[in-house]
Amino acid sequence: MKQFWTMVAAAVLVISCGEKKEEKNDGGFEMNRTKKEAPAAKASEGVPVDLSNNGVGPIKELTFPDEIDAELAAQGEAKYSTICVACHQAEQRMIGPALKGVYERRSPAWVMNMILNPDRMLKEDPIAQALLKEYNNAIMLNQNLTEEEARAVAEYLRTL
């Protein structure tokens, strides 16, 4: 009897280790866990790169100095780490876009207005609306930052 069960176990092992046959999908649910990432510096498909758009809000124009203000960037990093990382990573898309290289795609004023005024930006700015559509209508919540706090976050984004 023991020999019989040994043979059955061996047969099951041979069958289970055999060639994998491709199954035909009859329209049911299929899940693919392959991770595909677009490079962070490239614009999202369908969302144009536009450095001339300053957005809608209190910031009409903003030009960064050549050198990064390390102290301001550190303040911005602290704020970013507490409120932004839930939706944004530096190099990976999440609920919102990856933020590394954001100033290659958006003007500093646009970024500041999006931080300060996401509600109005999502209603009136065509780029914000395109991003909203691309990110499955996941709205950016207004964090009620002051201009100084938003400027610190904007400075930190320069370091990514």
Image (cartoon, rainbow, N blue to C red):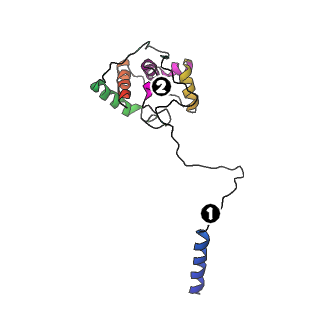
Is 105 situated above or below 63? below
Q: Position of residue 25 (x, y in %)?
A: 69, 53
Q: Position of residue 121 (x, y in %)?
A: 51, 20
Looking at the figure, which quarter contains the C terminus?
top left
Which numbered dot is residue 20? 1
Residue at 38% x, 16% y: name it.
Answer: 63
The single residue placed furthest to the right in the displayed view is 26
Question: Which picture quadrant has residue 81?
Answer: top left
Magenta part of the chain: 98-123
Q: Is residue 102 magenta?
A: yes
Which numbered dot is residue 158? none
Count neighbours of disc 2 (C-alpha within 10 A) and say few if under 14, some if 14 to 19, many if 20 or more: many
Which residue lies under the disc numbered 2? 105
Q: Are marks 2 and 1 in contact (CB under 8 Å)?
A: no
Most frequent secondary structure within the magenta stretch: helix
Classify residue 37 as left or right of residue 16. left
Q: Position of residue 150 (x, y in %)?
A: 38, 22
Amino acid at the residue labelled 2: Arg
Classify residue 80 as left or right of residue 37. left
Question: Which picture quadrant has residue 89?
Answer: top left
Is 96 situated above or below 121? below
Q: Is residue 27 magenta?
A: no
Q: Position of residue 53 (x, y in %)?
A: 50, 17
Q: Secondary structure at mark 1?
A: loop
Amino acid at the residue labelled 1: Lys
Looking at the figure, which quarter contains the N terminus?
bottom right
In depth, the one of 143 and 17 nearer the eye is 17
